Image (spheres, grey):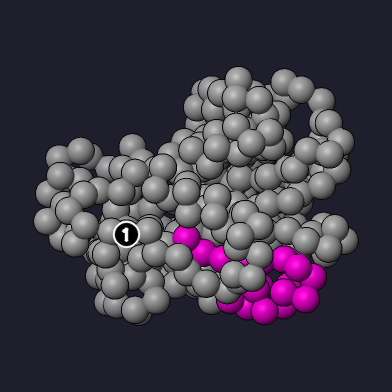
Amino acid sequence: MTSKRQEGEPGRKTALIAGGAKGIGREVGLRLGERGWAVALCYRKSRAEAETTAAAIEDKGGQALAIHADVSTPEVCAALVSQVLDWQGRIDAFIHCAGPYHRVDLLDETPAGWREMFAGNLDSFFYLARLVAPVMVKQQGGRMVAFSMANADRLMAQTQLTAHYLAKVGVLGLVRSLAKALAKHHITVNAVSPGFVDSGSLDPAELAGLVKTIPAGRIGSVADAASAVLYLLSDEAAYVTGTSLHVSGGWGI
């Protein structure tokens, strides 16, 4: 299912946001809309939220295209990128916000659950990055931003979310490899690594209980995370690549 409210306009910068219907992805899309970008956002289940986000982006002066796509499969990723290129003819920024999350004891994890965490968080980033990279190489420039987590670089034992955590560790490794491979083409690849962010997916009572573990004394907002993404997309970050930008108020470091 695709929602297309405006035809593409030459000259606009174009962003592809995987997982852009809600949370941090939505906030990034709205910020880019304010800057006049064309924003293609994909969603897996949240059709109504994606439609609302697309409309809000256009209300802010941008263009929007909402596309139903399960990016855990390579064929769907190829169709998604092709559709964005048919719409605007270019991709200046790729932001990977997609990724399922579940908490389960390691010894109770199932092969299906394990596979879902890697397919949604790591495989999908690889599938899309390998398709977007040639587009950016041809343009001789671009930005990629993926999401890890604030303590992923510490390789900690995580018995309650092992598969999700290891997928996010993998994201950091893939970010660095892509950054090194694409730097000569003026393409930067970075990670944003949040701590606890109130994106609407966690119970407010649970978030309140976590505050005492955060040195900054507060839960992060989607605006905090989106601001980090906007910096990495900016001209000011043109020489920043292969990094993990912690947005955690000091948690996880």
User: Looking at numbered disc 1 in the image, what kind of residue is underneath it?
Assistant: Ser
Q: Is residue 34 left or right of residue 142?
A: left
Q: Using the image as rendered, state which of residue 96 and residue 225 is in the foreground.
A: 225
Examine the image and state in which quarter residue 184 appears. bottom right
- Quarter of the picture containing the C terminus is bottom left
Q: Which residue lies at the image location 56% right of the left edge and 23% below the top edge?
A: 56
Task: Assess whether residue 178 is covered by the magenta stretch.
Answer: yes
Rendered view: 92 above or below 61: below
Rendered view: 229 above or below 150: above
> What segment is highlighted magenta in the picture?
176-192
Q: Is residue 24 left or right of residue 102?
A: right
Examine the image and state in which quarter residue 113 appears. bottom left
At numbered mark 1, what does the secondary structure look like: helix, strand or loop?
loop
Q: Using the image as rendered, state which of residue 143 and residue 84 is in the foreground.
A: 143
Give the residue pinned by disc 1: 248
Mark 1 residue crowding within 10 angstroms, few (<14) / some (14–19) / many (20+): many
Residue 150 at x, y = what percent?
36, 65
Q: Is residue 210 left or right of residue 67?
A: left
Q: Which residue lies at the image location 45% right of the left edge and 43% below the top edge?
A: 24
Q: Using the image as rendered, state which of residue 84 and residue 248 is in the foreground.
A: 248
Q: Using the image as rendered, state which of residue 138 and residue 37 is in the foreground.
A: 37
| Tally of marks | 1
Residue 2 at x, y = what percent?
70, 28
- Quarter of the picture containing the N terminus is top right
Residue 191 at x, y = what percent?
51, 64
Residue 53 at x, y = what percent?
54, 27
Task: Assess whether residue 32 is covered by the magenta stretch.
Answer: no
**Residue 17 visible in image:** yes
**Residue 174 visible in image:** no
